[in-house]
Structure formats: structure tokens, C-alpha cells
Amino acid sequence: MKIKKVIRLFIVSVMISALSIPMLYATPSVDELTGQIDSARGEANQLQAELQAVLLKISELEEDMIVKGEEIIQATDDLEVAKEKEAKQYEDMKLRIKHIYEEGNNGALEKILSAGSISELLSQAEYIQNVHTYDRDMLTEYEQVKQETAELKASLETDMAALEVLEDEFDATKESLNVTLSNKEAEIASLGIELEAAVRAAEEERARQAAAEEEARRLEEQRANNNAGNNNTNNGNTNNAGNTSNNGGNTNNGGNNGGGSTNSGGNGGGNVSTPAPAPGNTSTAQAIVNAAYSQIGVPYRWGGTSPGAGLDCSGLTQYAHRQAGIGIARTSGSQGAGGQRVSNPQPGDLVCWPGHVAIYIGGGQIIHAPQPGESVKVAGLYGSPWFVRYW
């Protein structure tokens, strides 16, 4: 009997000693992981803010380029008008010279000398001189206008080239930030997995410690009962232990029933779903698609809003919607910010990227005006756009 008591006391002392020994973790603690996640989220928020700033600059730059493109279009038209006026003035001057001298220099001289009075003679001579002066002045003026317009056009094109370089730089910054942000989000996800594992391990350790403490308490109670040395009392204690087991069984049943209820609630929640937005007027959507198809092959032109002549990306989408009786904003940023966001695109929807827009035509394809040097064309859907519906 004494040997059993000694063994039990030894077991209790070993378990209590084990509880006092700190656990050594190979992985970071829950607090450390939480701190790392908070830090990574702060960095991700900063990256997101920088990305939003770049996207805003891209949107503003697009508006500047549209204005500059429209100025270039106007300067090009003005230059053509100046050239035409210069050519017409030159032809008119030749006709007047031919008329004045159609009878030769002598004929013109005879008209002057045959004047009936000094006043008429001076008038004839002055007329001929004024014709020459007028023609020279007009030719000089038209030549000057043509030169100034050509210089303005060249200056605008230089400005546009600089804006395009800036656009490329913003695009490169945007892509770099996107990559960095994606990496940071992956890091946060990885830390989240580690945190879940650490929390799980901590909970398991607490449960293990609680079980060990409970077992130690039970053994201590049993040792105290054995010290009483009363067989009847010992029998009673044995029965009580059995009742405790039965009660424990009831507790387990209650836990199972509770778990079953929880599962039923979870299934009920799983049946809830958010319906996708219903398509609008499909005939209107088809009109948008048809209008976009009608412009295939039209050259890209910054600031272009002329169907069949020159269009930029938002000029194309604005035209396509206008043909369907829908008015939308002029720039891609404003177009992408309006309408109704949809997750399941249908033909006729607007496809939006930062600084670019297109018309979705179905089957993973779009119609868009890509960039200077290219024309409106059909292309495959790419990147990570969002979709907007105006119909």
C-alpha cells in the first residue's frame, strides 16, 4: 500500500514539475506573428496609397493628352487651311498680273498715259502699285500664318511625345507597385497561415496543461481518499468516480448535440447566395457592339472623337455608346467610375483598366483603340480589368 502511495506521489510531482518548465517554440509566438502581420499590413496600405496616387496621375495625364491631341488636330486643320489660302492667293496674284499685263508692259503704260487728267493718271498708276503691294502683303501674311501654324503643330507634337514618355513611366511605376503589393499580400497570407497554426498550437498546449492539472488534482484527491483507510469510504469514492464518468459521458453527448446544431446553422448559412446583376436591354448592348465593330481599322488618334477618321480609346467607347442612345463621359477614368459594376461581363459592357477602356464583345474578346500607330481592332481580354455596364 505504501509503495502505491509513493508511486502516485512521484507521478504527481513529475506532472507538476513538467507544468513549470516553459515550452520552447521553433516558430514565432502568436504576439510576434501578430506584430509582423500588422507591420506588413501597414506596408501594404502604404503601397496601396502610392498605387492610388499613381493611378490618379495616370487619369490626369490621360486628360492632358486628350486636350493636347485635340490641339494637334486643330493645328493640323489650321495648317491645311493656311496652305490652301496661300495657294489661292498665289493663283489670284498670277491672274491679276496676267490681266494687267495681258497686253504687255506697253499696254499697261498706254492705259496710264491715256488718262484724261493728272488725277486719273495718278489713279491708274496707284491702282497698279496697290495691286502689287496687296499681293505681296497677302502672300507674306499667309506664309507667316503657315509657318506659325507649322511651328505650333511641331511644338504640340513635342509636348505630346513628352507626355507619352511620362505615361510610360507611370505605367512602369504602376506595374512595379502592383508586383510589390501582390508580394506583400502573399506575405500577409503566409503570416496568417503561420498565425493560425500558432494559435492552434497555443490552444492545444493550454488544453494539454489543463488536462495535466486536472489529472494531478484527481490523483491528489485519490491519495487523500486512500489516506482515510476506510474501505466503505473507498467503495463510496469508487462509486462517485463512476458517477463522474457517467456525468462526463453526458457532457460529451451535450457537446455532440451542440456541435450538430452548429453544423445545421452552418449549412443554412451556406445556402445564402448573392445573385449576379441581371443584364439590361440586350438590343441596346448589341447596338454598342455593332458600333464598335464599325470602327475597326480606324487609326488611333490622341483626342480623336471622329468616327471613320481618328479615335482614341475613350473616344471609341463614347461613340459606341452614343450610337446606342447612351451618353457617357469623355475620359477613361470618368467612364470607368460610372455605370454599374458587374462581375460577369456581357457583350456591350465597358472593360476598364487604369488609363484605358474597351468594349467587351463576348468570348473573352474586346474591341479597342490600343495606342498611337495602331488602329481600332479586336483583341483578347488581358490583365485584371473591371467591368461597367451602362445599358
Image (cartoon, rainbow, N blue to C red):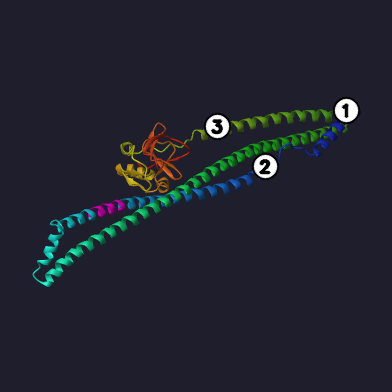
Identify which amino acid the numbered label 3 is placed on.
Ser
* Residue 33 pos. (x, y %): 67, 42
* Residue 96 pos. (x, y %): 17, 57
Residue count near mark 1 (Cα–Cα under 10 Å), binned few <14, some 14–19, many ≥20: few
Q: Earlier in the sequence, mark 3 or mark 1?
A: 1
Q: Earlier in the sequence, mark 1 or mark 2?
A: 1
Residue 221's place in the image compared with 101, above or below, is above
* Residue 215 pos. (x, y %): 78, 33
Residue count near mark 3 (Cα–Cα under 10 Å), binned few <14, some 14–19, many ≥20: few
Q: Which residue is rendered at x = 33% and y = 50% of the image?
A: 76
Q: Which residue is mark 3?
A: 264
Q: Which residue is mark 1?
A: 4
In the drawing, what numbered circle is on residue 33?
2
* Residue 230 pos. (x, y %): 87, 30
Label 1 close to label 2 by CB (< 8 Å): no
Q: Quadrant of the C terminus?
A: top left
Spatial separation of the CA atoms under disc 3 and disc 1: 49 Å
- Foreground tag (2 vs 3): 2
Which residues, given as a range, are shown in magenta? 78-88
